[in-house]
Image (cartoon, rainbow, N blue to C red):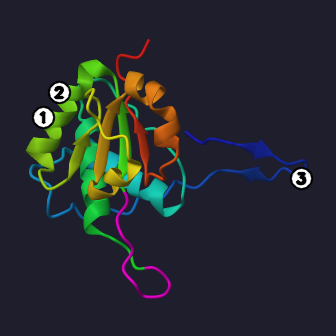
Amino acid sequence: VEIVIAEQSSGQRYVPKKPKPLAGQPLPEGFRGDLRPYQKAGYDWLHFLKEFHFGGCLADDMGLGKTVQVLVFLQSLKENISSSSNGHAREAKTSLVVVPRSLLVNWQREAARFTPNLRILEYFDADRPKDPRVFDEYDVLITTYGIMRRDVKLLRGYTFEYVILDLSLIH
């Protein structure tokens, strides 16, 4: 099957070239487990988005491992702290993960199982920190949509490396 995008008045046809596969990224040492090929492709996709400073969406059916793909990506960020132009190591920054309350336990369980070295702040209890400088001590801050709405002024005052929204079960 030939796909024709446009046909010029001169009769020349433009046929798009087959896209190159995404560059495969090594899995981080702190990852405990294996990724299925489609999960590895999602992990590579997240790195592609990072390389080109794009935002993106990782969408798939429920239960196919998007959580682990994101956790492995965050683990790789922690392990691959890039150097700045002046040669000094850049500090890894905290990423924010916002989930429906019903998925908190799943994210906690998956993080403990697959990326046990990620320092995770579970930011949803009544006694959660009110000083954003505490966030610097963690790789990932996990919270709920309800807490994010309540603490929006505090959270928006902090510069997160990534903001990840788990939209599962959001209606």
Residue 10 - label: 3
Q: Earlier in the sequence, mark 3 or mark 2?
A: 3
Identify the magenta region: 84-93
Q: Nearer the viewer, residue 127 or 122?
A: 127
Q: Residue furthest right?
A: 9
Q: Secondary structure at mark 3?
A: loop
| Residue at x 25%, y 44% (from the top left corner) | 121
Residue 105 - label: 2
Q: Residue furthest bottom?
A: 87
Determine which residue is flagged by label 1: 109
Check if mark 1's residue and mark 3's residue have beta carbons within 8 Å: no
Task: Bin the neighbour count of mark 2 within 10 Å (Cα to Cα): few under 14, some 14-19, many 20 and up.
Answer: few
Distance between mark 1 and mark 2 Cα atoms:
6 Å
Predominant SS along the magenta part: loop
Depth check, mark 3 against mark 2: the one in front is 2
Distance between mark 3 and mark 2 Cα atoms:
61 Å
Check if mark 1's residue and mark 2's residue have beta carbons within 8 Å: yes
